[in-house]
Amino acid sequence: MTRFTQEQLAAARDRLVPDVVADGLHVLFCGINPGLMTAATGHHFAGPGNRFWPVLHLSGFTPRLLKPSEQDELLSYGLGITNVVARATARADELGAEEYREGGRLLATKVGRLRPRWLAVVGVTAYRAAFDDRKAQVGPQELTIGDTRVWVLPNPSGLNALWTTPKLTDAFRAFRLVTGLPDASCAGSPED
């Protein structure tokens, strides 16, 4: 992994990171917003403590552990990545309530245009703020966007210590099973 100086990371603040999307995806994963490492590299979930890529593989969404730099390979599995808020920050708590609400409006428009089967928001706090649903919990949501169903997953950030890697993997696996996607991590093997 490339090492960045504090100055290089600071220079990445407010940068935009292109989505990894296509029409008709099976699942569009949606992060809160890019961190500085993600913005510096241009690759989603690139922070060294972020567990998104390992958990994606361990839960059976990908046949092998992908590096953030291999993010475009997700499209071949019918998966994509976007964010609620596009601008990069050092911490998600730097985002304001209006940014979340506007991000939710823009996300709904994007989902309406791309028509994924599922939108999976990784972070219940971000989902609550973006869609003004204070009671939302991890799991399926009542909200649909057109024909797209919505699921909230726990935030895979290393700062989310309540969700250990095994617990995150279980939550992602439970979601994968609901989507009907086969277990890509053990192709040819019977399901869990």
Image: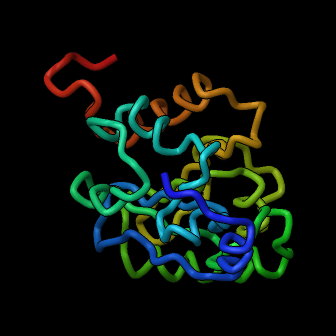
Q: Nearer the viewer, residue 67 or 84?
A: 67
Residue name at image x 39 percent, y 49 percent: 67
* In-front residue for pair 47/103: 47
Which quadrant of the view contains residue 84? bottom right
Residue 128, picture quadrant: bottom right
In the displayed structure image, the side of residue 124 where residue 34 appears, left or right: left
Tell whether 156 sits left or right of 80. Answer: right
Write the residue at 51% across / 67% down: 41
Q: How is the image coloured?
A: rainbow
Residue 13 percent across, percent down from the top left: 71, 78
Give the answer, above or below, for where 42 lies relative to 30. below
Query: 16 or 141: which is nearer to us?
Result: 16
Give above or below for 141 relative to 179: below
**Image coordinates for residue 116, horizontal then vertical, percent:** 37, 64
The correct choice, above or below, for 182 with respect to 3 in the image is above
Looking at the rendered image, the quarter that the C terminus falls into is top left
- Which residue is the extreme one toward the left? 188
Q: Position of residue 121 (x, y in %)?
A: 59, 56
* Residue 52 image position (x, y, % from top left): 53, 44
State the residue at coordinates (38%, 58%).
69
What residue appears at the point 25 percent right and 51 percent down from the top-left corner?
A: 77
Q: How many discs mark residues in the rendered view?
A: 0
Image quadrant of residue 126? Answer: bottom right
